[in-house]
Structure formats: structure tokens, C-alpha cells
Amino acid sequence: MTAEFIAAISYCAVEKLKNFRDYPVSSRYYIDMQIERATAINYLVPLANREHRALDELLTRLRKLKYEKYEFFSGEYGHADGYFLGTTRPLIMTSDNDEKWNIGRYTIKVPVQGVLNRSLETFKMRPIVPDVEILHAYHPHHTSNHTCWSEWSKSLTEACANCHFDRIFGTFLGFLQSYYPGSPLARPPERGEVRDPGTDMYWMVQLNQEEVKSIVLRR
């Protein structure tokens, strides 16, 4: 992880604390909401101040996830309109009836403003394949113009609320590795089906149990 990535995490923590300052929790709110806000502030202050221990603990949690690397790209106005980018390791997607697909690696784009405003529609997940720019569907539940978040929306929104970046990137892994055939936006290839390059999800390959074991052992 680059120094710019770490600096951007601290920037997000600072901006979240400003929001807490501008919109304090009134004493009339339930005590559990006040405790929740205090817990968030205690988590964010060390990140905002770039305290080594807090940053090291967060970075350690990020390194344990199935990502090859994390990067940050500044925008025209620096951190404010920049974005985080995570590159996953090869992933296996599993359906609720235990069918599995090798879906390869993905890049996860997380704009700073998406985190600060909890704007899930700004987050992008793209497979690392040729012709990705002409695809309509990148995943059974994520297309160029729609995402079926299901229960993942709550986890992602809560993670963004307090800048829990390990949870943010971890939630994307959970989303990508899950397939619910009852509510797909698009259908992944069936076993033995070969799709031409440029076709939606042409890179996905349905696996049998032996193939799954072989892939897991190679990691």
C-alpha cells in the first residue's frame, strides 16, 4: 500500500469527524446512538491523526483479505475527488445451491465521495479481462447500469459510515463470491458453455468439486 493510499484514509477520517462535529447527536437521542457515535469517533481520531498503531492495525486487516494490491488515485482536487482501487486475487463465486465458478480477478473502485456520502451507486467492480469496456454485465448481480446489492447494502453502508476500509473491501469480496440464481441481473455460463470474447461474463467457468480443490491448493 502506497503512502498516498494511507494519506487518503486519513483524509476520509478527517472529513467524517467534521461531519460528526457539524451534526452532533442530540441528548434526546437514545443512549445506544450516543454510544455508537462515541465509538466511531474513538476509531476515527487515531486515523485522522495518522497514528502508527491505528494505521498498522487497519493495514494488517486489509492485507489479510484476498487482494493483490491497493492503490489510490488523486483527482483534480486531490483526495476529495480521488478514488481507492483494490485488485483482487482470483476468486471463486458460489451459488446458494453450491455451484461454483472461477470468475478470475477484479478491480474494485471506491471513490472518496462514495465513502463519505455512502453513495453505493458510485462503486464499480470490473473483471480484469479484455474488452471490459464493451460488456454490459460484469457479474450476475452487477451490470453497467444497475447493482442488486441485496443484504450487502447494509454492510457496505455501515462500513462507509465510519471509514472501516477493511470492511468495505471485505464486503465487495463477499458480494463478488456470492450468486443467488433467484434474482440475477444476468446469467453466468453453465458448465461446458463457451462464450465469445466480448459477451457478458464470457470469462467465467463453472467448476466441479475437483477443479475447485485444485484451484484452492494452488493459492
Image (spheres, grey):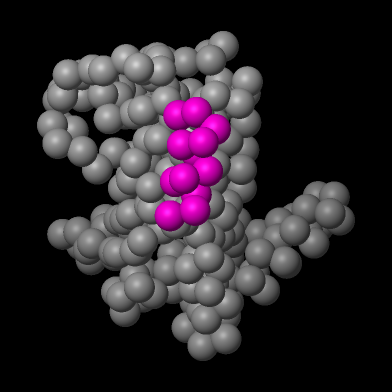
Residue shown at 22% from the left, 63% from the top: 74
Q: Position of residue 142 (x, y in %)?
A: 39, 27
Query: Does any portion of residue 162 appear in the rendered image?
Result: yes
Quarter of the image for the C terminus: give it: bottom left
Residue 188 higher or lower than 14, as above or below: above
Q: Is residue 25 left or right of residue 35?
A: left
In depth, the one of 15 and 204 nearer the eye is: 204
Residue shown at 15% from the left, 24% from the top: 197
Residue 165 higher or lower than 13, as above or below: above
Quarter of the image for the N terminus: give it: bottom left
The answer to which quarter of the image holds residue 41 is bottom right
Residue shown at 66% from the left, 64% from the top: 40
Q: Position of residue 31 (x, y in %)?
A: 86, 56
- In magenta stretch: residue 210: yes
The outermost residue toward the top is 182
Q: Position of residue 162 (x, y in %)?
A: 58, 59
The outermost residue toward the bottom is 52
- In magenta stretch: residue 27: no
Query: Does any portion of residue 160 appear in the rendered image?
Result: no
In depth, the one of 157 and 179 nearer the eye is: 179
The answer to which quarter of the image holds residue 79 is bottom left
Most prominent secondary structure in the magenta stretch?
helix
The magenta-colored residue range is 207-218
Residue 195 higher or lower than 205, as above or below: above
Q: Position of residue 187 (x, y in %)?
A: 40, 14
Q: How many labels were placed on the picture? A: 0
The outermost residue toward the front is 210
